Amino acid sequence: MNFPLQINFKVLAIARQLSLTDATGQLIFYVKQKAFKLKEAVTLFADEQMTRPWFNISADRVLDFNANYSFTDYTGKPFGSMRRQGRKSLWRASYEIFDGFHPYPVALIKEENPWSKVFDTLFGEIPILGVFTGYLFHPSYLISRPDGMPFMRLKKHASFVGRRFSIDKLAQLDQTEELRILLAIMMMVLLERSRG
């Protein structure tokens, strides 16, 4: 994959849809979040026409306070999981990524500046001016090992409806680790965007 990667939300879709492309514009994932589901269910496709499912992400419960999100490939084989850290995420978005083989997390996702979310929410409540929050507040998230060594950084970019993100690579990873982290990032972006 050629970094930096780009995440773009599709505007005016009933179900949330987004694409992940590399620096050359090559599609990596096309993501569709199933609409009107009690439990989160996301399918990641290898093509924009959504004819080749590649991965599925599904929640283990209806409420996502401490939900676990399991990753499976197109054959149903487990590929790891992600868990939202409920209480820690009240102030600063915080997630753990698991490889499926060990009981401890192999990576963490942490919001770098929770104040940007606070100001985004407060400013968003102001009539008329609230629609411009996408140009003012740009949260970023650091993906790192549990010991603090950074792997990747996700950053939101200025846009009218807050729909563009980039992912920079900060360390070498094997392809399986990269894919697992990208699955977690895609799910986290969907969850955090739905919270504002």
Image (spheres, rainbow, N blue to C red):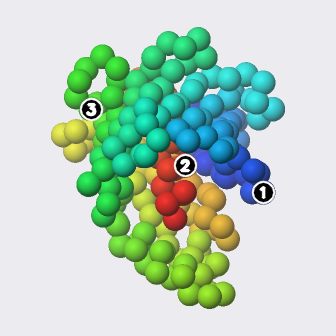
Residue at left 40%, top 74%?
A: 118
Depth check, front residue: 27 or 94? 94
Residue at left 23%, top 24%?
A: 103
Mark 2 element type: helix
In percent of width and height, residue 107 lies at 31, 36
The mark nearer the N terminus, 3 or 1, is: 1
Separation of marks 2 and 1 at Cα, in angstroms: 15 Å
Disc number for residue 190: 2
Q: Are marks 2 and 1 in contact (CB under 8 Å)?
A: no
Q: Amino acid at mark 3?
A: Pro
Q: Which residue is denoted by mark 1 in the rendering?
A: 12
The mark nearer the N terminus, 2 or 1, is: 1
Against 184, residue 15 (above or below) is below
In percent of width and height, residue 109 lies at 35, 46
Question: In the current view of this chain or complex, which residue is farthest to the right?
Answer: 49
Depth check, front residue: 9 or 16? 16
Mark 3 element type: loop
Disc number for residue 140: none
Q: Residues within 10 Å of mark 2 (few under 14, many from 20)?
A: some
Looking at the rendered image, the quarter that the N terminus falls into is: top right
Q: Is residue 145 left or right of residue 54?
A: left
Res 87 → quadrant: bottom left
Mark 1 element type: loop
Q: Amino acid at mark 1?
A: Leu
Against 36, residue 53 (above or below) is above
Q: Amino acid at mark 2?
A: Leu
Residue at left 25%, top 42%?
A: 149
Q: Which residue is denoted by mark 3 in the rendering?
A: 105
